[in-house]
Image (cartoon, rainbow, N blue to C red):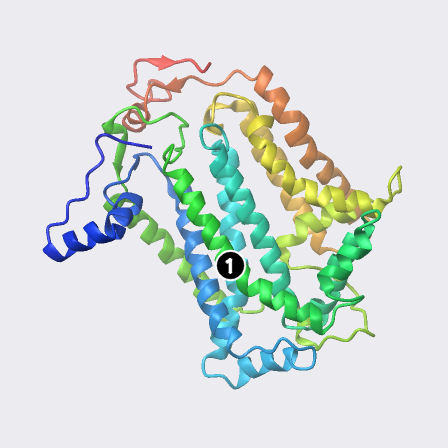
Amino acid sequence: MSFPWAQQYAPKNSFMRYVDEKLPLPRFVYNAVGAGYPVPRNLNYFWNFGVLAGAALAIQIVTGIILAMHYHADIGGAFDSVEHIMRDVNGGWFFRYAHMNGASMFFVVIYIHIARGLYFGSYKPPREVIWLLGVVIFLLMMATAFMGYVLPWGQMSFWGAKVITGLFSAIPLVGPTIQTWLLGGPAPDYNTLNRFFSLHYLLPFVIAGVIILHVWALHIPGSSNPTGVDVKSEVDTVPFHPYYTAKDGFGLGIFLLVFAVLIFFSPNLLGHPDNYIAANPLSTPAHIVPEWYFWPFYAILRSFTVDFILPAKLWGVLAMFGSILLLFFLPWLDPSPVRSGNYRPLFKKFTIFGLLPAVFVLGYCGGAPAQEPYVIISQFAAAYYFSHFLIILPIISMIERPLPLPNSITEAVLSKGNETNSFGSAPKLQPAE
């Protein structure tokens, strides 16, 4: 988005002028994350999580490159190479724990980032392409994390690979062929480790490339904001630097503090103890579960237990992938012109007291054994999850009467705290269309 009041890059140093003339990288950085990029003045700390996601990806790439120098993608040496990293490589334990827990921190940040986008309507026009690219990033993250979980070649790694790739065999006609292609053979073995290691190493750089497109697309309409009102004048914005670089810096400090506590005091909190046992194809674990960030989708997969026209296993696979793919259609499933959930009473209630608890319940049931009452609970939660997006949101957009919107971002900011009305001294409010 072009802001006529944005500060223009004007290097004072002769060397910087020369660099800017030959390779305008300083100008690009200045306009992307510096004073040349005005952003809404009312962004809260929920808008920190985009930067935190970038920091988490950088941590994963750096630690992953270091670990790859010592890892052996071989069924006879993969598990031992991880033990070698932990015991013999200088600082190896730190890089391994940082990489392992960094994946969990990455997903925590992304899930909060998605939740913010859902509540504040960041998927609505003119930012739908930003949202679609974000869903692509999420899918790439899930693929990368799954393949990375297989690499230590522990019990849960082996059986997780066998179970998850086995889901594709439920697809009629081409399913067994896809499963064999993914594994490189009839079962997880040397070929599986080789291709998973190659893709796990490559995909983070693909994610970084899509993130560049994501940020590029963001700079066209500009950042969203908690009110959902478009920027209308210079007073509605502040330069990204130093205002939001300082705010992001504070958020990054909190993120790194939590990350450090996890690494140094409870590094195995989010892992599974069975993965410290070498993979054994002849010994099936009592309870096979993926990593915690896959649990909601795993619960949806297991919630189908009855064959109806199609096999239950196929229904589960379709529902699991469908639960993510329907996010691609969210900009059109919710046609309400009001973006922010703060001004949509019904939407706010169904999101906070309906969708959010359903996702947490699915997460809990996904990590529990595949038995009652967890199966029936996950069935109800999965039913609500799909109903929320396919039924409730379209109906709400038709019957809901939104609250009055402020005339501008500045009006909403400056009028906070006044008891006369919800926007303080703002005398004029335009009703939502």
User: Which quadrant would the N terminus be assigned to in this image?
Assistant: top left
Q: Give 30 or 237, whichever is nearer the viewer.
A: 30
Could you tell whether 84 is left or right of 252 in the image?
right
Q: Is residue 26 above or below residue 238?
A: below
Quarter-wise, where is residue 150 in the image? bottom right
Disc 1 residue type? Answer: Pro
Could you tell whether 384 is left or right of 255 in the image?
right
Which residue occupies 19% across, 39% down? 8
Q: Which residue is mark 1?
A: 204
Q: What residue occupies the far front of the structure in this picture?
A: 22
Q: Position of residue 262 (x, y in %)?
A: 49, 65
Which residue occupies 77% across, 53% down? 168
Q: Position of residue 129 (x, y in %)?
A: 49, 35
Which residue occupies 70% across, 55% down? 367
Quarter-wise, where is residue 163 in the image? bottom right
Q: Position of residue 98 (x, y in %)?
A: 49, 68
Could you tell whether 242 is left or right of 53 in the image?
left
Q: Give 129 or 343, whichever is nearer the viewer.
A: 129
Q: What residue occupies the far bottom of the structure in this picture?
A: 88
SS at circle 1: helix
